[in-house]
Image: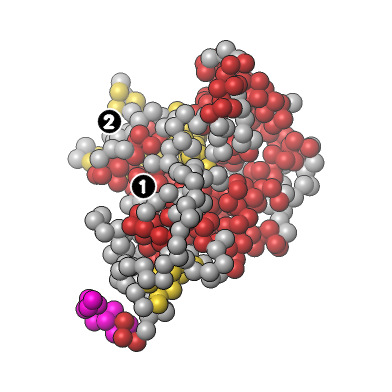
Amino acid sequence: MTKLKDIKKQWEEFIVLKDHRAIDMMLATIIGNMVLDKDPIWLMVVAPSSGGKTTLLAPIVDIENVYFVDDLTEKTLLSGYKVKGKSASLLQMIGSGIMAFSDFTSILSKNTVSRGEILSQLKLVYDRKVSKYTGTGGVKWEGKIGFLGCATADIYSHLESGRSMGERFIYYWLDVPTDEEITRKQGETSISAKEMTDIMKVYYKEYYEGVKKWLDKNGTPTLKMEEYQKERVRQSSIFCVAGKATVHTNFKTGKVDQIPQKASVGRDFKSFEALLLTLQIMNCYEKNDFNLPVQDWMIDVVDKCSYSSINRERRAILEILAHSDEPISASEIGSTRGLGLDKTSVEIYLNPLFAVGLIKKQTKSNSFKWYIDDDKTIEFIKKVENAVPQIKLKEDEEVIKDDDVDEDLFSSNTPDSNLNEEDQAMWDSGEPKED
């Protein structure tokens, strides 16, 4: 029987496999969607361009009911169009299965109208039922569709507006090797991408079929977690929902100008449970032990997914604040830990984090200082930050702490609990503060 260690060992012959868990996640997405009667798992693997995500994805091609999709339009998923009497709608062609996307970012790069329509339809696909009516009649689809896609970090900005509709993705930030590691490995092997896929697709297919046969023989175990593990999943889900909340900002000033739209935590919690059960099953198969419970490393993976739901800049700011012993200004944040952003740029990311309650703001005179006051949030960030590496822009600078930072008191449309009575009155009246 093919096991995960066999797959990873073979991969290491060809590439620098920096992130072993990415293999687990991709195969868990296929297995969980195809063999479990649970909520769909929609995994988005995020990494820089040429980060190796498509290389790891490509070998799923021979697994049953997997369909690679290179492009989507508003009419791809479901339409009344027929070719030689057969439906041309992708959903009706698939029935139930997996949609795989080598580059989902390019699909989201379409114009705003097309992107919004595609995301609206995908939301219905996740919910297992789509109906469309046209002048020539109606067309319907019911089934279960899994999603496994790759994207660059641009996906965060592309999805910002669509998240208010309740996007369904679980994010996983892929840890990629350094340029030096990549070039050194490429110097040791001359195998092409196609040759790698041809070899690895046999391993992927055998692994999937092995797990499926094991389940047919032994049955499906129930999700087994300790109470502290359940609490960790709850905290991850809450953080994930806050991180994915739609925070509308003014395109000129970067200031929040609408109340944040945050989804309920239930869907993400259920998705994480489906993922954990699949990982538990895979571990049972690996060790041929039906009674194995969820392992702590699986909860670590959920934590990483939750943290991956936030873009790199916001994550970097959260990490800086989590390690700061006192509130600090936007200028200080921008010059810490290689973030490399000026005060104005930092404020663009501070305002949404403040609006959803992940960070707090301290007001003294005309000076703003930022901090995190929730111990659970600080503990979560410190625990998971190393699992989602940041890309440093430049080295730290020595910054003189400024207690008179010229910050706009009204940088957010959310009132601050630290406002004095005079400033609160001005907030309520909407009158600007005089210099």
Q: Is residue 349 above or below residue 376?
A: above
Q: Quadrant of the C terminus?
A: bottom left
Report if residue 52 is visible in the image.
Answer: yes
Q: Give whichever of 309, 278 is nearer the camera.
A: 309
Image-quadrant location for residue 407: bottom left
Q: Position of residue 202 (x, y in %)?
A: 62, 20
| Residue ID at (55%, 32%) | 178
Q: Label 2, label 1: how many angstroms apart (C-alpha)?
A: 33 Å
> Foreground residue, 179 or 133?
179
Can residue 210 be seen here? The reply is: no
- Crowd class of label 2 (few under 14; some 14 to 19; many from 20; radius 10 Å): some
Q: Nearer the viewer, residue 67 or 6?
A: 6
Circle 2: element type: loop
Kind of residue at badge 1: Ser
Placement of 48 over or under 310, stated as above or below: above
Q: Secondary structure at mark 1?
A: helix
In this rendering, the answer to whether 306 lies above or below 220 is below
Viewed as shown, does residue 13 lie left or right of 70?
A: right
Q: Which residue is mark 1?
A: 157
* Tag 2 residue: 81
